[in-house]
Image: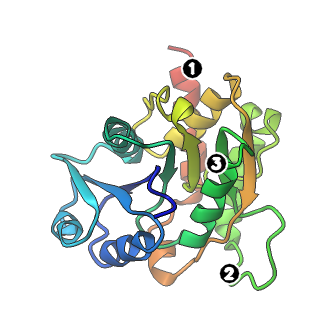
Amino acid sequence: MANDDTWVIIPVYNEVTVIAQVVADLHTTFRNIVCVDDGSTDGSAAQIATTAAHLVRHPINLGQGAALQTGLCYALARPGGRFFVTFDADGQHRVADAGRMVDAARSGFADVVLGSRFLDQHEGRPHRVPLLKRITLGLVVALSPVARKMHLTDAHNGLRVFNRAVAGQLRIRMNGMAHASELVSLLARSSWTVRELPVTIRYTEYSTSKGQPLINGINILFDLAVRDQR
């Protein structure tokens, strides 16, 4: 397959109803997939075991940041990996967008390619970003000096591509959702090239039911401020 040099990392927490289909859709384009079951209690691990994905399990729930770091370490230890994709487990990301981002990274477009739901989209975009989600994400960007410095439009999109040099140096310390802002801060301090590409998020009833409330944007910034003062 064209993407044999690519690993897709999926952090999973209680996604039993959708995770098998997410893996099946990905496997049409990407052979190497690792799902990190982050202490799920709903049988997600058993579902993953029926798919073509590699399964790594946390005995307890440690948070999405920890699951991503575990998945990156696992994928980096496998031979041949040059590009590493982070992909959400709830079905909101499109495989075609991930493929375009990997192609861009492979072409030398950037060391890190971040998906953005707020850049100009291609025609036929099926879903607009819900109002509360726009407010939450806009708040995080507006109150984050680092995101403003980097001119990012979507600092908390879970669809990302790293080349091997970047992935090998990532050390995610924020276990919860604040890991996304932590990653942006790390990228801002590095010499890596970081660019965004437009992506479409599929906001289904299922995925929006698992979304983050507005207060979480404030909590994320507070967690990062406390960490930076340590």
In space, the residues marked 1 and 2 are separated at their CA atoms by 36 Å
Tell me the amino acid under the disc marked 2: His
Give the image location of residue 26, x and y in percent: 44, 70
Q: Give the vertical position of 188 relative to 221 (above or below).
A: above
Give the image location of residue 147, x and y in percent: 74, 38
Q: Nearer the viewer, residue 80 or 189?
A: 80
Of pointers 1 and 2, the one earlier in the residue sequence: 2
Kindly identify the residue that appears in the image at 25 percent across and 71 percent down: 51
| Residue bearing the label numbered 3 | 106
Where the N terminus falls, by quadrant?
A: bottom left
Of pointers 2 and 3, the one earlier in the residue sequence: 3
**Residue 130 appearing in the image:** yes
| Residue bearing the label numbered 2 | 127
| Residue bearing the label numbered 1 | 228
User: Do the CB atoms of the residues marked 2 and 3 lie less than 8 Å apart?
Assistant: no
Q: Residues within 10 Å of mark 3 (few under 14, many from 20)?
A: some
Of pointers 3 and 1, the one earlier in the residue sequence: 3
Give the image location of residue 221, x and y in percent: 60, 37
Tell me the amino acid under the disc marked 1: Asp
| In front: label 3 or label 1 | 3
What element does badge 1 sit on?
helix
Kindly identify the residue that appears in the image at 50 percent across and 65 percent down: 211
Give the image location of residue 18, x and y in percent: 35, 77
Q: Nearer the viewer, residue 150 or 53?
A: 53
Q: Nearer the viewer, residue 163 or 69?
A: 163
Residue 199 — which label? none
Tell me the amino acid under the disc marked 3: Arg
Q: Give the vertical position of 117 relative to 184 (above or below).
A: below
What element does badge 3 sit on?
helix
As drawn, the residue found furthest toward the front would be 1
